[in-house]
Every structure is written in C-alpha cells, then in structure tokens.
Amino acid sequence: MARARRSSSARPPVPATDSRVLELTRQLAVLLGEHGLAEVEVEAGGFRLRVQRTAVSTAPTAAAAAPVPPPVSVPATAPAVPEPVASNLATIEAPMVGTFYRASSPTADPYVREGDVVKEGQILCIIEAMKLMNEIESRVAGRVFRILVENGQPVEYGQPLFLIEPQR
C-alpha cells in the first residue's frame, strides 16, 4: 500500500496519478523487497512518499491440503556437500548486501584474478549498494585461490567472495 502526502507549502499538491510519483513508488517497492524492509519513506521539497508492506492473509485452499509427493532420491553421483575448502585458506566475505563487481568499470581489467598475489589492504572488488561503490580490500596477504562470485551477481551480507591462501 502506498500513500502520497504533501506537507503544507506554496506549491500545489502533486496528483497521485503523476507518472513521477508512480515510478518513485515502484522503485521504493523494489527496495522494500530487495532489502526485506517493512516501510520506506522519502521526503523532498515538501513532498513525502511512504511505501509500506502489508501482511497478506492467505486463506487455506484445496491445493494446500493436497498430499505431498514422496521425496525424489538423489543419484549417487551428485555430491552431498560442497567441495571441501582447505582449512588454511582465508575467506573474504561480503560486508554488506549489494552487487559484486570485479572491476571499476565494465571496460577495466578486474582488480584481481585467480592466482594473483595480493597484499593486505589491496582492493579485491567493488560492492555497489544503493548507488554507492564500496571497495572491498583483502584482510590478508597471499594468493587468490578462488573467486566465488560472478561479476554483476547480487551478494548477501556474510557471503564468501574470495578464498585467499595466506603467505607464509
């Protein structure tokens, strides 16, 4: 549910059907979903827009009462657990939710590649969060063992990004 309110000022109120208001409402609704927010409010130039997520009640349906099919067996060739990671590797994790970029621009070379030797504090990647570019630095010196995220992929807080083999 979105409501547009206008505080008192000399300018006439903006109609709720104004395409700019509708577009801003859509963008705020996307932010709600992406970041798991219940409410977001924007105020600029005396115009205030609040978008709230409301709980949707769902009535039980006949489909919900349908019997659940038995689980499908997994073939023996499929690995049950992810590839084991050597205990000596340092994991660089995402410090925020955002979009992972390996380079400063689409035409630039990546900051690092697998096998590169990095110093402590060296920039490994960028995470874009709310139109801000945040440089992610290595917290250890060593060799980039594996890059775990694809360029342009969304990342979550705490998600492993790089495995680095520390220098001895």
Image (cartoon, rainbow, N blue to C red):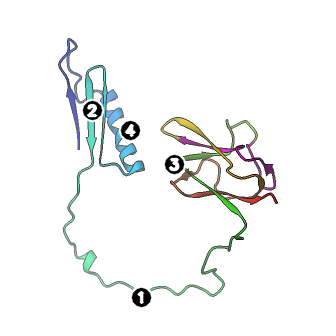
**Against 77, is 84 above or below?**
above
Q: Earlier in the sequence, mark 1 or mark 4?
A: 4
Q: Position of residue 16 (x, y in %)?
A: 23, 29
Give the CA separation, mark 1 to mark 3.
39 Å
The amino acid marked with disc number 2 is Leu
For image coordinates 26% across by 37% down, the residue present is 50
Q: Earlier in the sequence, mark 3 or mark 4?
A: 4
For image coordinates 58% across by 51% down, the residue present is 153
Tell whether label 4 touches label 3 (CB within 8 Å): no
The amino acid marked with disc number 3 is Met
Give the CA separation, mark 3 to mark 2.
26 Å
Q: Is residue 82 magenta?
A: no
Q: Residues within 10 Å of mark 1 (few under 14, many from 20)?
A: few
Which one is in front in this view, the residue at disc 1 or the one at disc 4?
Answer: 4
Q: Quadrant of residue 7?
A: top left
**Against 139, is 75 above or below?**
below
Check disc 4 and report the residue beneath it. 27
Is residue 74 left or right of 64 when viewed as pictured?
Answer: right
